[in-house]
Image: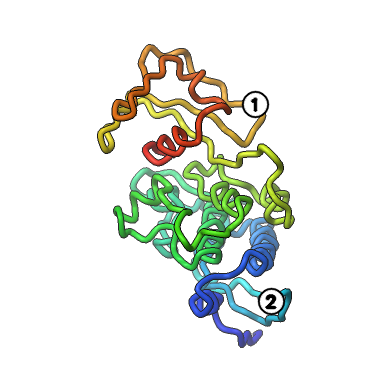
Amino acid sequence: MELVRGGELFDVIVRNKSLSEMEARHVFLQLLEGVGFMHSRGVIHRDLKPENLLVASSRPKDGGQLYDVKIADFGLSKTIGGGASLARTRVGTPQYWAPEVLDVQKRGGSYDHAADFWGLGAVLFVMLCGRYPFDGQKQALDEQIRTASYCMSGSRWRGISEAAKSLVRGLLRVNPVDRLSLEECLKHPWVLGQPLPPKTRLEPPVKWVLRQKDLHGFSLLTVGVTDFNKEKQHPHPPCLPWRLLLVAKGITVDNLSRCFTRGISCAFYAFYNCCCDQ
């Protein structure tokens, strides 16, 4: 048995309030390597969090520290595939639950390795700002997770690169199919230590919502979908007769396929992204 003397990464984050991007990147690369190895052996961890990352050693670099970590606590891990039973149990730590883990017993079905990538997104969020992405303060924790309602604004995110934020967004996607994979993470500009390419928007794809919502005085009758990460957008469903009405803003859009394109305004997209299911 190996003795790891550096304690939990969680304590390091609390002590320093957060990690620098250089420090977080070094840890995240190790997590990708470890999770990739586990998944290649058909094992999902199901409880990735800073408390389960043990610091084996550290060394100074460019005014910071590079932490060598080890993934620990496999008590909730599970073998999937190869004839093993499906993952159907809600286990882990609530603040790090993926939506499909949260609702697996209520809605039925199962989940797979994509749940670990949601966990990686939550861990990266905590490393960068020192707070949980989902804390249950402004709305119920379950609802925050189901709608991926997190905030990357404020003083704690000031100075954090857009590349880092885009990686968090790519991992904290409600639909497991839309979540970044191991290969996509390894090729992400932030992981490679590069800025985002010019005019590149790495935003989560937005899904169709065909039910009425009334939020803070804004009436939404129907909503469209575009994946800003890909050159080719998702096929639009048949043209719908409804309008998208933003009454409080006085905006009326008749053609949804024209509305949800790359030319959509940042302000409109921000409002839309906050109000709609993801």
One can see residue 211 in this view = no
Lower position in the chain sequence, tag 1 or tag 2: 2
Q: Residue at x 66, y 63 (%)?
A: 25
Nearest the camera: 72 or 170? Answer: 170
The local secondary structure at tag 2 comes to loop
One can see residue 93 in this view = yes
Residue under numbered circle 1: 232
Q: Please state, as top left, top right, bottom left or bottom right, where the N terminus lies in the image.
A: bottom right
Q: Amino acid at mark 1?
A: Lys
Vertical relation: 252 (above or below) 146: above
Disc 1, disc 2: CB below 8 Å? Answer: no
Q: Position of residue 274 (x, y in %)?
A: 40, 41
Q: Position of residue 46 (x, y in %)?
A: 51, 61
- Find residue 8 and report its image quarter: bottom right
Q: Residue at x 59, y 34 (%)?
A: 228
Q: Rounded to the nearest whole Å, what is the CA distance between mark 1 and mark 2?
A: 42 Å
Mark 2: give few (<14), some (14-19) or many (20+) Cα within 10 Å: few
The local secondary structure at tag 1 comes to loop
Q: Position of residue 26 (x, y in %)?
A: 69, 67
Q: Amino acid at mark 2?
A: Gly
Q: Which mark is residue 63?
A: 2
- Find residue 138 and report its image quarter: bottom left
Nearest the camera: 48 or 246? Answer: 246
